[in-house]
Each structure stands twice: as C-alpha cells, then as structure tokens.
C-alpha cells in the first residue's frame, strides 16, 4: 500500500513537467513552421538528406525533421548534419538534464547573490540595493524592511536597474532609472509608482559600467556574453560563446529588443559578422557596429577564456543541474559580473546560427546517445 501511495504521489509530481514539455513541443513546431519562408529555399541533395537520416538514426535511434538544420543553414550558409535542433533541446535535454524542482528555485534572480557572488575570485553579481521576495521587502543587507522604507531607499538611489526576478526572460520589464528626489529624472515615474508597477518579486541593482574593451564596441549597454555550460561524462564543457551588443542608443542589448549578436571564439576573437536575429526570424547582418563603426573581424577580447572557466567552475557549484545558460559581462574594474543564470527555457538556435558550429561539437553523438537511453 505504501509503495502504491509513493508511485501515485510521484506521478502527480511529474504531471506539471509533462504538461510543460507538451506545451513546449507544440510551441516549437508552431514557431518553426512560421519561419518556413526563411529556410524554404535551402534544398538538400539526396546524398545530403541520406547522410543526415543515417546520422540521426544511428545516434538518436530515429529520423528527425531537418527544418531546424535548414533554418540555421539559411542564416550562416554553413551546412551541418550535427546541428542540434531547438525542439530536442527544449523537450528532451532540459527535462532530462535539469531537475525541475531545483530549476524553479535557482531561477529566482533574487537568489543569484547568495548562489554566485564571490564564489570565484574576481567574479561577483551586481550589488543589490533593494528587493521584493514574495511581497516582502529587503534592503541591501537582506534585512526585512517596510514598504515605506523601501520607497524611501528607492527615491534617491541614483542610477539603477530594476527587473522582475520570477518568470522573466528576454529582458522583459527591465528598466534603467536614475532616481533623484523621489522620481526617475528621465521618465518622471515616481518611486511609489515603480513599487506599485512591479508589485512583487523584483530587484533593484547597480547599473554596471562595461569595461573599455566592451564599451569601445558600444558604450551605452553592458554588452552581455552568453556562455552555455553542460555536463558530459565527468566534465563540464561549453557551447559556442556569443556576445550580445546594444545599438541605436538603447541601453539594453537583448536580441529580442533589437540588439545584435556575434559569435566569439574561446580565445576571444569576434566573428566576421554580427546579426540582428529577433526571435530567429531575422538575419540582418553587420560587419561593423552601425553606431561606433568598430569592425568586428579581428577584434579580440582578452578575458573570454576566463569567462569560460568561470562558467565551468560555477556550474560545479550548482547541484542537480546539467545545463546552464550564463549571462556575463565585465565591468570597468575588470571584474566578471554574473548578470544571471538561466535554467528554464534555454535556447540553442542562436549560438549555432551565429557560429556555424554544432552546439555540442564533438560531444553531439554522446549527448544524443544519452537521451536515447
């Protein structure tokens, strides 16, 4: 009886995950079909299709659609049979590699400071001035405070970044303010209005100033690196690294908000071209930054190897998680800043579009065989 009870209880725990996977599966198919005009002209020869089918049958156990591969190829002109399709990552890799319960906890951005701040020498998280956790306000020392005191702190905090900490993605609802005498000097919104707007689960953090190497490319946004780490066998590896860059006077660099992205080699060299990808529905390409005129090809960043090693080390400290999408930048004191870590709803399409490389590289067959089991 006790055994049966445990089985039934375990089944109920799995239901939310199964529902989420099903919803994601439908969403991925809807998205790729909508993008058909982008890849419909990519036609494979019979030999290419045969090679593709044999590769996936051998390593994954069955044939798959080539739509995602053709979409990536349409953006960068590089044909590969070992690209990793977004639908397999979102419906297979994440659910298998990442424990759902742990992901839910780790995804609360109010906990980033506790998990990642100063865990590696020279690596920290943005300083938190004020936060709201489940309706309760905390000051910079994580002491409970009243709503009135929170408004008072916010009123003269100066430049800061305000963002939601739960169920947030793609820079949604992130604002940059300069609070003086109770109001944001640019928008005129008051501290009371900001608190009312965000209501619950948000953080107010320092505005990071980018290092010289990044601000030379574009000075108004922090310019963020996406480093995706994953466990394979007994080691932690990383997927192709990318850099998000702001433009057009914007202070944010999110690719869904008009920012551009570019592949970065592990030794710090930028690729020849950056792209405005939108939601994977735009391939607008730039060989130099349209605002600053900085040429991308040949531009080297000195700290990328350290970013990669930092991602690997922090991943080792994050229990029950097999794949993490890290957002890093480097500030004007040459410190690595962990902007956030992503555990739910990660993506593999843009690193492959930007780099023309397989997401898992030489580990692709191992990964496919592991999810096949």
Image (spheres, grey):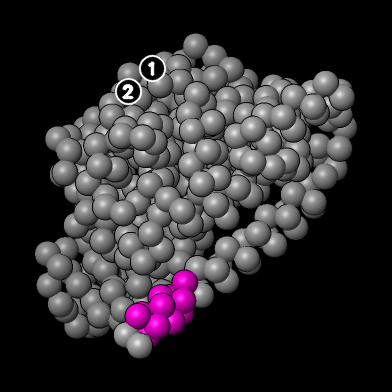
The image shows residue 351 at horizontal and vertical percentages of 55, 34
Whole-percent x, y for residue 366 in the image: 49, 33
Pick the front one: 357 or 299: 357
Residue 261 visible (yes or no): no
Q: Are marks 1 and 2 in contact (CB under 8 Å)?
A: yes
> Label 2: how many residues lie within 10 Å, few (<14), some (14-19) or many (20+)?
few
Determine which residue is flagged by label 1: 267
Residue 19 visible:
yes
Q: CA distance from mark 1 to mark 2?
A: 6 Å
Q: Point out the residue furthest to the top here.
A: 298
Locate residue 245 relative to residue 287 in the image: left or right: left
Which residue appears at 16% of the width and 44% of the height? 119
Quadrant of residue 123 within the rendered picture:
top left
Front residue of 41 and 49: 49
Residue 84 location (% of width, % of height)? 60, 37
**Circle 2 — which element?**
helix
- Residue beneath the point at 33% across and 19% down: 302
Please tell me which of labels 1 and 2 falls first in the chain.
1
């Amino acid at each position: 009886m006790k055994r049966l009870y445990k089985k039934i209880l375990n089944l109920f725990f799995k239901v939310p995950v199964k529902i989420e996977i099903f919803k994601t599966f439908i969403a991925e198919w809807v998205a790729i079909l909508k993008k058909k005009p982008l890849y419909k002209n990519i036609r494979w020869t019979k030999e290419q299709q045969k090679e593709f089918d044999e590769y996936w049958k051998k390593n994954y156990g069955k044939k798959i659609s080539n739509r995602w591969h053709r979409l990536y190829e349409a953006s960068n002109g590089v044909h590969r049979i070992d690209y990793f399709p977004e639908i397999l990552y979102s419906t297979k890799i994440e659910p298998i590699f990442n424990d759902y319960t742990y992901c839910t906890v780790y995804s609360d951005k109010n906990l980033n400071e506790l998990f990642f701040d100063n865990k590696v020498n020279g690596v920290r998280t943005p300083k938190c001035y004020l936060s709201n956790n489940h309706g309760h306000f905390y000051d910079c020392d994580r002491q409970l405070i009243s709503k009135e005191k929170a408004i008072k702190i916010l009123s003269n905090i100066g430049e800061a970044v305000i963002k939601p900490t739960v169920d947030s993605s793609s820079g949604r609802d992130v604002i940059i303010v300069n609070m003086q005498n109770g109001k944001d000097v640019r928008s005129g919104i008051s501290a009371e209005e900001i608190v009312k707007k965000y209501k619950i689960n948000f953080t107010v953090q320092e505005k990071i100033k980018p290092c010289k190497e990044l601000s030379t490319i574009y000075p108004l946004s922090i310019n963020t690196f996406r480093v995706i780490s994953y466990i394979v066998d007994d080691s932690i590896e990383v997927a192709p690294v990318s850099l998000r860059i702001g433009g057009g006077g914007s202070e944010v660099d999110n690719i869904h908000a008009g920012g551009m992205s570019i592949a970065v080699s592990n030794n710090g060299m930028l690729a020849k071209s950056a792209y405005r990808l939108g939601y994977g529905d735009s391939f607008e390409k730039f060989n130099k930054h349209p605002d600053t005129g900085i040429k991308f090809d040949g531009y080297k960043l000195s700290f990328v190897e350290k970013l990669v090693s930092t991602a690997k080390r922090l991943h080792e400290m994050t229990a029950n998680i097999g794949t993490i999408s890290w957002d890093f930048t480097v500030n004007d004191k040459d410190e690595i800043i962990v902007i956030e870590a992503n555990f739910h709803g990660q993506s593999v399409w843009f690193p492959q579009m930007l780099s023309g490389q397989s997401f898992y590289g030489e580990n692709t067959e191992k990964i496919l065989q592991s999810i096949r089991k």
